[in-house]
Amino acid sequence: MEEKHKTGGYGRERLKEERSPLINRTWIKDDPLMLRGCHMFDKAQVVMLTEQELITKEIAAKLLKALREMEQLGVDKVRPGMHGGEAWITKNPRYGPDVGGWIHIGRSSGDLSVTGYRIALRERLLDLLEAVCELREALLDTAENNLESVMAGYSHNQIAQTLTFGHYLLARVLPHERDFQRLRECYARVNMSPAGSAIMSGTDFAISRERTAELMGFDEVIKNTKDAVFGQDHMLETLAVLAILANNIGKYADDLDWYSGFEFDEVEPADQLSGTSSIMPQKKNPVCFEDFTRGRSGLIFGRLMGALAIDKVGTHAVSPMLMIPPEVLNAIEHTLGSIAVMTQAMKTIKFNKDIAKERVTEDWAQATDLAAALTRERNVPWRLAHHIVGTLVRHAIEEGKLPMETTPEMIDQAAMESIGKPIKWDVNSIRRALDPLESVKRRQITGGPAPNKVAEAIKECRKNLKKDRETVSSLRSKQEEAAEKLETAIDSIIGD
């Protein structure tokens, strides 16, 4: 008689051979966050099955004691993959299959794995929400210290108009406020329970999906059992939100990288966030703005594209539910790393105010102000004033004149060429129009770079930040309350 082959893993009785290491799903069993999520599901599952009278309290107590024993040993160490809870209990001689064989009533590896990943993902999303708040605070603090630190604003890589470093940084805070909102909305769609959906059609056991969801801290149950297991758009949404966040960070990381170069020398990162060269002893490389921020954004973009490619295989494949979640968690780790680096960079960055002011006065960043002053003080129509100043700039460059060297005679020469008559303007008015700090102070419109307006905007941003931190605290409290409710229910069963 042929000897019966002993399969090495759970659920392989249908097969004659052990699983090849070539197809071991290491991306599942090696993720500690996912394992802890599956462990929580195990505990909630046992409580629910007990309350629904699908297992006896005697069996439930043994299962729950075994699960707590696993916690003492370390969930990450003793759960060998998705079915680790059941496998460990079944193989343990104190419990065996007569105990472990009850835990999996009404569920499948499908809802077990996607539930575990949703629990892991929501935890990391909370970490991201907190990290974005920290970055916003660092940006606001540095912005508040640079309300009158004038600098050149650029378009087409050419000096355009005058800003302040405070105004520039505030322009980076607002996208991160929207990043927070997107992450918060993403959290809401992630924190929905697929538990009890099995692999697609649920079960005919009288389980309570709502009770299991409540015990695990989910806000609601996913209404369709097939969508609950095979729907991955919440993962794609998370990656898309991460890509936008990474892009927002990458934009000013790129700016600050250039501003730190010798040709600009307007900002300097702290030594602790800089690198050197093994051959060029003079180098101070701003790596905090390069590979640790911009470089990571490329990895996140790639994971989004990869996940979209995996998910498009259709709703009959299980590869999306197995392969996309680890990529999302990996992308979150890279994003958290970028945020941490940029937060520290903003707390320690040095802005060279004198150099930045010199740069902005060497070029024609106040040309628009000069044209506006012609309109306001000399009643010249705006478009004609624009022509006059454009002609003036061309002449000044040809003659090697700096903006502050502009004279009334130069204005008249440009005016004669442009409109056929002189302006007869005084030199003090010209100087006021070309002063960079006065330029930003005049911009009293909402959202403008005037120091008082930026200060008002920072105050409003701090209010938003306080509210958002309260939101994160509330979300964490809900998870803690659910965990406490679960443990209380377990105590009740074990104690009977």
Image (tube, rainbow, N blue to C red):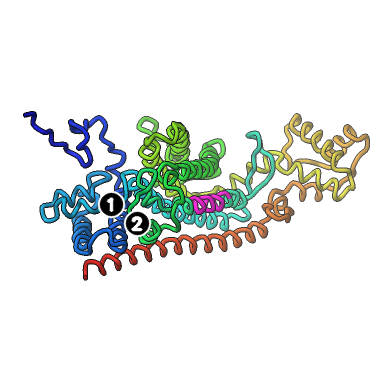
Q: Residues within 10 Å of mark 2 (few under 14, many from 20)?
A: many
Residue 292: quadrant of the picture: top left
The foreground one among 320 and 364 is 320
Q: What element does badge 2 sit on? A: loop
Residue farthest along the front direction in this orientation = 204
Q: State the residue position of label 1.
A: 105
Q: Is residue 262 magenta?
A: no
The foreground one among 39 and 317 is 317
Residue 283: quadrant of the picture: top left
The residue at the point 53 percent across, 60 percent down is 465
Magenta segment boundaries in residue numbering = 175-186
Marks 1 and 2, how far apart in space? 9 Å
The foreground one among 150 and 288 is 288
- Residue 14 point in image, percent of width and height: 22, 35
Q: Which mark is residue 207?
A: 2
Residue farthest along the right direction in this orientation = 421
Query: Does 74 sit above or below residue 57?
Result: above
| For marks 1 and 2 on the same chain, the one whose residue lies earlier in the sequence | 1
Q: In this image, 144 relative to 95: left or right? A: right
Q: In this image, 38 relative to 6: left or right? A: right
- Mark 2: which amino acid? Ile
Report whether residue 446 is seen: yes
Query: Does 57 sit above or below residue 373?
Result: below
- Residue 111 point in image, percent of width and height: 35, 47
**For the stretch drawn in magenta, what is the main secondary structure?**
helix
- Residue 15 point in image, percent of width and height: 21, 33
- Mark 1: which amino acid? Ile
Q: Are marks 1 and 2 in contact (CB under 8 Å)?
A: yes
The residue at the point 77 percent across, 31 percent down is 394
